[in-house]
Amino acid sequence: MPVKALITGITGQDGSYLADFLLAKGYEVHGVVRRASTFNTGRIEHLYQDVHENKPGLRLHYGDLADGSALRHVLERVQPDEIYNLAAQSHVRISFDQSEYTADIVATGTLRLLEAFRDYVDKSGKAAKFYQAGSSEMFGAAAPPQDENTSFHPRSPYACAKVAAHWYARNMRESYGLFVANGILFNHESERRGETFVTRKITRAVGRIKEGLQEKLYLGNLDAKRDWGFAGDYVEAMWLMLQQDAADDYVVATGESHSVREFIEVAFGHADLDWQKYVEIDPRYFRPSEVDYLLGNAGKAREKLGWTPTVGFEELVLRMYQHDWGLAIREKFLADSGFRER
Ligand code: NAP
Ligand code: GDD
């Protein structure tokens, strides 16, 4: 029998890479998707097989972290061995505008799923395992480098909610002895990154500026520093956490930090463009409180999980730029041929 995994947030950047990774390992993968008026499954389209075909490796179930009974039904129906809770309102800036909603999904939503998990383990008798997607944002204003012993100092409603989720998960482990692991992941990016996060916003813009489709790129704080890794590497760390004998908490990071300005310089450099001619500062993108400097120490993950990142900063920027330049070339070709993408 294949191992069964359930992924919330499967339609997001990490969910799609994790689904790729687990399917390649022979898992039966189940994902929770939200109902939307337009398709939200673009990132997993390449994995989708019609349910009418024989034994598809990937199966999708409607659900929402706001809806505890639906989550319980999915757990009962799927009977998973591993649960990866990746669903979130994951945009830090937007969490200042939608703070209650962010708390409901990120903090209380995690609690809903953990409570359903507790009952599921109790009833099924399965030694199922749970991964909680924690974030370096929880460190916030704490001085770098940050590791598992660094105190949290969250600086946004999103980060406060992730701290609550982290402690709900830890409390579930300490109270009931359940296998619940917390990943504390630093920023990780890819060509599947949402287009309003700063890295993708930059690489999309560079490609479009190069093809004459866009004149300016409006950004906020260029001085913030982040420890940026590749999402494909980070989903392996999630999986490794659930292959251990005992549950624990782990920082996952590259150990290298760069400013937003450095990211811009490298990305525009690939296109042979002078970034200063195109980048404008728009204060709308400033945050009420900022996280200035994230730099992770992933020594514990390296020693205990045997995990190391394979993609460095320069390679990450290059692969994102090349992908987005390709998209811009296609967009230009369609526009020149009289077609407009919807
Ligand atoms: P993402 O691309 O924004 O994906 C978020 C996923 O959550 C999407 O599938 C989204 O569905 C789903 N979702 C949102 N609200 C939901 C709800 N109410 N109920 C059910 N599903 C919901 O995020 P990501 O970059 O893949 O990150 C995955 C997780 O890791 C998140 O929890 C994030 O906070 C955390 N994290 C990310 C990073 C990073 O650098 N990427 C670092 C540390 C931690 P739709 O597709 O329908 O919107
Ligand atoms: N999004 C965005 N847009 N950020 C900008 C912009 C802009 O136009 N201009 C400057 N920035 C700065 C932000 O102020 C922040 O300091 C930095 O770029 C990174 O912003 P994001 O890419 O939005 O990511 P984040 O670090 O706030 O949050 C991401 O990483 C966290 C892990 O540390 C998200 O993926 C979170 O979900 C994740 O937990």
Image (cartoon, rainbow, N blue to C red):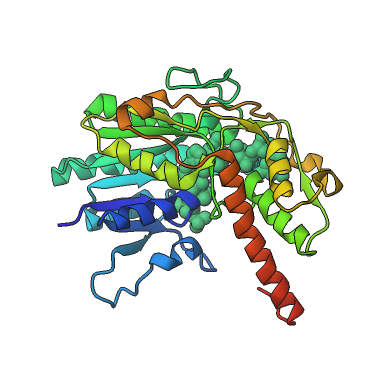
Give the position of the C terminus as an image quadrant: bottom right
Judged from this view, the residue extending furthest toward the right is 277
- Identify the residue at image location x=20%, y=31%: 245
Where in the figure is residue 325, as x and y percent of width and height?
66, 60
Q: Nearer the viewer, residue 272 or 254?
A: 272
Q: Nearer the viewer, residue 303 or 280?
A: 303
Where in the figure is residue 157, as x and y percent of width and height?
58, 34
Judged from this view, the residue extending furthest toward the bottom is 338
Give the position of the N terminus as an image quadrant: bottom left
- Identify the residue at image location x=36%, y=51%: 7
- Identify the residue at image location x=55%, y=26%: 295
Q: Does any portion of residue 75 appear in the rendered image?
A: no
Q: Nearer the viewer, residue 121 or 232?
A: 232
Q: Relative to 186, is 18 above or below?
A: below
- Is residue 257 found left or right of 122 in the rendered image? right
- Identify the residue at image location x=51%, y=26%: 296
Where in the figure is residue 286, as x and y percent of width and height?
74, 37
Q: Does any portion of residue 152 appear in the rendered image?
A: yes
- Is residue 75 found left or right of 12 in the rendered image? left
- Is residue 332 found left or right of 235 in the rendered image? right
Q: Relative to 229, is 206 above or below?
A: below
Q: Relative to 31, is 339 above or below?
A: below
- Find ligand 2 in the image and state its quadrant: top right
Where in the figure is residue 71, as x and y percent of width and height?
34, 51
Q: Quadrant of residue 102?
A: top right
Count of residue discs: 0
